Image (tube, helix red, strand yellow):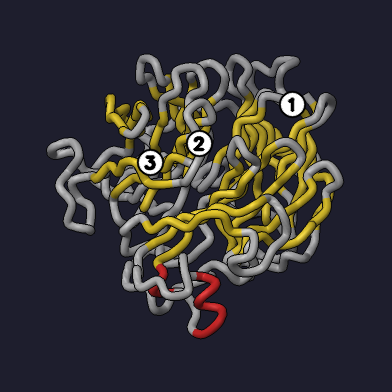
């Protein structure tokens, strides 16, 4: 979950908006590469969850961090069906009233999720101090007799399971609050995980016996660690979605704005056993962001802002603000889909899914669907269509949109 800023936006001037059959398209230089997107169906419930976080797609599998049921929900993306929960009851679940951090859900779990090279599921979780009592608490903690109370990162087999059954690894990060969003380096089996409310990153080697091989601490971390780079603090809006550049192998880490600071993207080289900071890319004009972050196949990043989205050239640092606050802004998770050649960002207010084309001009469509949408989005693509999965904030299941290139 991201924190919003309040500074004035620097908006790109946009042409008139045309509304046709519930689809709002920003008129511009439409090309054959712009996808046609519309609502397709709803999966579920189950899960009937209003408390969810990040989602992920690999091959024909879609997973979702489900805090209501303290599980990672498992779906067949090709059949559009719900299969069951992974590690059901083995996470801290939805925590709010007893969390001492002001950010909503900062003690909850599961949070960030993904599937690695071995088709194993990784999930960030809240602090073990928030695990339930009794038998359920033993299944939530890294071990029944574990006395470590800090945040956890867990690995599971990709199959329906309960509690600690099917769990392959459980690591404590040392954070007071949740281990949240993550990205994976398949070349070196390295996982980067953000403790967003604590102000640090963990680098995990996933192959062999999984272990934390390095941690990167910002100067404003709350666990009393020296800064990994002297004087380098977050902008104050937490730490959000990281993404890996498959061409260079670098991790790009979103660091949202908190007025008066400017949001930015930090670039890391995940060398074996070390997370090496390379540089920062400032993202001026991106109010409250960037939060969600995704990269195309040409070194261009798209970051979510409360006033739209920021197109960021990762090579030269050029930033262009696109869209409007009431349409494509504010997403927690962005997904780039090569099948339809577009980015997808969900806007939880107003039931809106934003589509930002990767074609010249970056045309924007906004699809409005009653009962939709949430703050996370993931895409499964086939040779002919792409299916965009968008869990609903109302707890009525997963809204599925279909895109045709």
The kind of secondary structure element at disc 2 is: strand
For the residues labelled 1 and 2, the Cα–Cα distance comes to 28 Å
Q: Which mark is residue 57?
A: none
Name which residue lies at 58% across and 59% down.
Answer: 167
**Place of residue 279 in the rendered image (x, y in percent of width and height, measured from the top left):** 27, 25
**Place of residue 327 in the rendered image (x, y in percent of width and height, measured from the top left):** 58, 43
* Residue placed under numbered mark 3 in the picture: 203
Q: Is residue 98 left or right of residue 33?
A: left
Name which residue lies at 42% across and 56% down.
Answer: 171
* Residue placed under numbered mark 2 in the picture: 184
Please state which of residues 348 and 48 is positioned toward the viewer in this rendering.
48
Check whether the beta carbons of the residues at disc 1 and disc 2 lie within 8 A of each other. Answer: no
Q: Quadrant of the C terminus?
A: top right
Q: Residues within 10 Å of mark 1 (few under 14, many from 20)?
A: many
Image position of 170 with respect to 344: above or below: below
Please state which of residues 320 and 147 is positioned toward the viewer in this rendering.
147
The kind of secondary structure element at disc 3 is: strand
Question: Can you see residue 292?
Answer: no
Please state which of residues 110 and 128 is positioned toward the viewer in this rendering.
128
**Place of residue 99 in the rendered image (x, y in percent of width and height, measured from the top left):** 37, 73
The kind of secondary structure element at disc 1 is: loop
Q: For residue 69, what is the image quadrant?
A: bottom right
Q: Residues within 10 Å of mark 2 (few under 14, many from 20)?
A: many
Residue that protrudes farthest toward the bottom in the picture: 134
Q: Which mark is in front, 1 or 3? A: 3
Residue that protrudes farthest toward the front in the picture: 208
Image position of 48 with respect to 385: above or below: below
């Amino acid at each position: 979950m991201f924190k919003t800023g309040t500074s004035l936006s620097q908006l790109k001037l946009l042409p008139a908006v045309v509304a046709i059959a519930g689809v709002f398209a920003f008129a511009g230089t439409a090309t054959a590469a712009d996808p046609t997107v519309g609502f397709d169906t709803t999966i579920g419930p189950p899960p009937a969850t209003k408390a969810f976080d990040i989602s992920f797609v690999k091959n024909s599998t879609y997973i979702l961090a489900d805090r209501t049921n303290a599980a990672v929900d498992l779906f067949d993306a090709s059949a559009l069906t719900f299969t069951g929960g992974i590690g059901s009851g083995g996470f801290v679940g939805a925590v709010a009233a007893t969390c001492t951090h002001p950010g909503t859900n900062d003690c909850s779990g599961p949070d960030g999720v993904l599937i690695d090279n071995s088709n194993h599921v990784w999930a960030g979780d809240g602090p073990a101090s928030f695990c339930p009592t009794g038998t359920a608490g033993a299944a939530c903690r890294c071990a029944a007799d574990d006395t470590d109370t800090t945040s956890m990162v867990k690995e599971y087999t990709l199959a329906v399971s309960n509690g600690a059954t099917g769990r392959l690894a459980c690591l404590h990060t040392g954070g007071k609050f949740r281990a949240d969003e993550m990205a994976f380096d398949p070349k070196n089996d390295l996982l980067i995980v953000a403790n967003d409310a604590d102000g640090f990153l963990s680098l995990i080697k996933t192959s062999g016996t999984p272990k934390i091989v390095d941690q990167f601490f910002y100067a404003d971390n709350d666990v009393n660690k020296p800064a990994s780079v002297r004087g380098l603090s977050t902008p104050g809006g937490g730490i959000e979605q990281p993404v890996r550049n498959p061409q260079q192998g670098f991790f790009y880490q979103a660091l949202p704005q908190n007025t008066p600071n400017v949001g930015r993207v930090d670039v890391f080289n995940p060398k074996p056993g070390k997370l090496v900071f390379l540089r920062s890319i400032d993202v001026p004009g991106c109010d409250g962001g960037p939060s969600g972050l995704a990269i195309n196949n040409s070194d261009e990043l798209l970051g979510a802002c409360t006033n739209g989205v920021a197109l960021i050239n990762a090579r030269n640092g050029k930033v262009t603000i696109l869209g409007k606050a009431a349409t494509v802004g504010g997403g927690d998770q962005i997904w780039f889909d090569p099948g339809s050649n577009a980015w997808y960002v969900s806007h939880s207010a107003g039931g809106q899914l934003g589509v930002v084309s990767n074609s010249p001009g970056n045309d924007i469509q906004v699809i409005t669907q009653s009962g939709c949408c949430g703050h996370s989005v993931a895409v499964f693509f086939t040779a002919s269509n792409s299916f965009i999965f968008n869990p609903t904030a109302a707890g009525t299941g997963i809204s599925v949109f279909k895109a045709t290139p």
